[in-house]
Amino acid sequence: MAVRSLYRYVRHRIRHIPSEGVQYLGICTRDGGGQDSDPQREETAAQDWMLKHAGMTGHQFFLRMVVTYYAQVFRD
């Protein structure tokens, strides 16, 4: 008796959940980087860290990133 498999493909979508917020991160790129603002709930908090870090170290180049946001997968 042969074994048969039946595959059923179901379409899914991913959507952002705005009520859960977004996290922001500033990363110093000087000398290979490594220093960052830690994930912040407010974009201004990450920017403030970059400004303070630049003032204290003289470093001028940063990556400004949206680190995470919450998403939900659901079937169509």
Image (tube, rainbow, N blue to C red):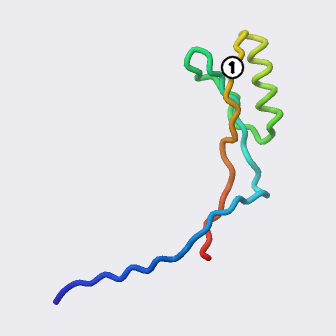
Please, is residue 2 above or below residue 60 in the view?
A: below
Residue under the image location 70 percent in, 13 percent down? 59
Point 72% across, 38% down: residue? 24
Residue 51: image location, x then y, percent? 80, 20
Residue extending farthest bottom: 1
Mark 1, residue position: 61
Give the image location of residue 76, x and y in percent. Answer: 62, 76
> Can you say whether 6 is above or below 60 in the image?
below
Q: Residue at x 70, y 32 (%)?
A: 64
Viewer-nearest residue: 38 or 72: 72
Q: Measured from the top left, where is residue 63 in percent x and y? A: 67, 29
Q: Position of residue 35 (x, y in %)?
A: 63, 22
Residue at image position (69%, 50%) is 69
Q: Secondary structure at mark 1?
A: loop
Residue reaching furthest to the left: 1
Q: What is the quadrant of the N terminus in the image? A: bottom left
- In the image, taking residue 61 as reference, residue 3 lies left or right, namely left
- The quadrant in which residue 16 appears is bottom right
Note whether 20 is above or below 72 in the view shown: above
User: Number of numbered discs present?
Assistant: 1
In this rendering, the answer to whether 19 lies above or below 43 is below
Identify residue type, mark 1: Phe
